[in-house]
Amino acid sequence: MSDDLDERLFVRATRAPWREILSHRWSATRERALVLKDTEGRYFVLGRRGDQGEPGADVPISDEAGAPGLRGTYVDAFHVDLTERMGTQAVALPTVYGAESVDLWVSWWVHDPVRVVRSRIVYGWEAVRTHLTRALRHLVEAQAVAGSGLGAPEVMQHLGTRQGLAEAGLSYQVFDVRLRETGEELHLGQAEGDAVRYSWTANRRGEYEFCLQALHNGPVSLAALWLLRHPDQVSQVLDWAVGHQSLLAPGADWQEEMASLLGTLTEQERKEISELLRDRIASLGRRVPGV
């Protein structure tokens, strides 16, 4: 497998076509194909046509291309590289926690040497990446219509099999999805800075059940859940609780409810929230022990 994306897919032969035919037959190479063009504009090809168990095995080359003969009148000959190559596409997948940066690892190859020469695609990665981007956007739209989320399992399910660029003579497939840290990436599902649209899927059943239980437990439970996710917003949560007494259970004392819920936190969580609350009170100009 080659990872040189700048390597040419085909080059024009320098010797006479009949010499190229003899040389190709004698060498029995499996990494290149020889494509010839005759005076009438017809194409002929010598080389591997998708061997079983290798990239392109199930993809027949152009029906228009037959095997060349030594007595043919050829005006051009081209060597086409059949080596499998590798590339990566940075993508931001939408999740409930925000955009998740991943790299899609893609293998791609020439499955039809004649179409590559006819289309004049010297460097194929740009064509593969354009097709992949279009396929990803269509996948996002399809998942949204179906009410499903988009993650690594969905990407592998739909793009982990061979995808063909018929007119270009190229094929590719996504073989891995890996987390990444920084860099330019393709944003899917939402514009940058927009709120993330998210739908529950079977892959996130545990999260669904947890949030469903929090909803059943009422506003106080949701407030405590928010406080766990945003411990720096203690004062906002308390202000909300005071200003929305009508949402609390009849006769419930919100101070006792919050104290009971906060009492279920771990020692480390209680310590962090206590420090945040201490700093907040101190910033208001009130005297706080230990500050």
Image (cartoon, rainbow, N blue to C red):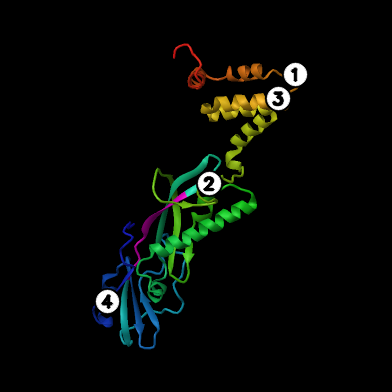
- For discs 3 and 4, the disc positioned in front in the rendered view: 3
Q: Are marks 3 and 2 in contact (CB under 8 Å)?
A: no
Report the side of 166 relative to 220 (left or right): left
Relative to 287, residue 39 above or below: below
> Quarter-wise, where is residue 33 in the image?
bottom left
Instruction: Tell me where the magenta segment starts and ends, as one range.
Output: 80-91
Q: Which residue is mark 4?
A: 13
- For discs 3 and 1, the disc positioned in front in the rendered view: 3
Secondary element at image label 4:
loop
Secondary element at image label 1:
loop
Q: Position of residue 34 (x, y in %)?
A: 33, 74
Q: Earlier in the sequence, mark 3 or mark 2?
A: 2
Q: Position of residue 3 (x, y in %)?
A: 33, 56
Q: Position of residue 61 (x, y in %)?
A: 44, 72
- How packed is label 4: few (under 14 Cα within 10 Å), some, or many (20 or more)? some
Q: Earlier in the sequence, mark 3 or mark 4?
A: 4
Q: Which mark is residue 94?
A: 2
Q: Earlier in the sequence, mark 1 or mark 4?
A: 4
Q: Nearer the viewer, residue 194 or 147?
A: 194
Residue name at image x 63 percent, y 28 percent: 240
Q: Which mark is residue 245?
A: 3
- For discs 1 and 2, the disc positioned in front in the rendered view: 1
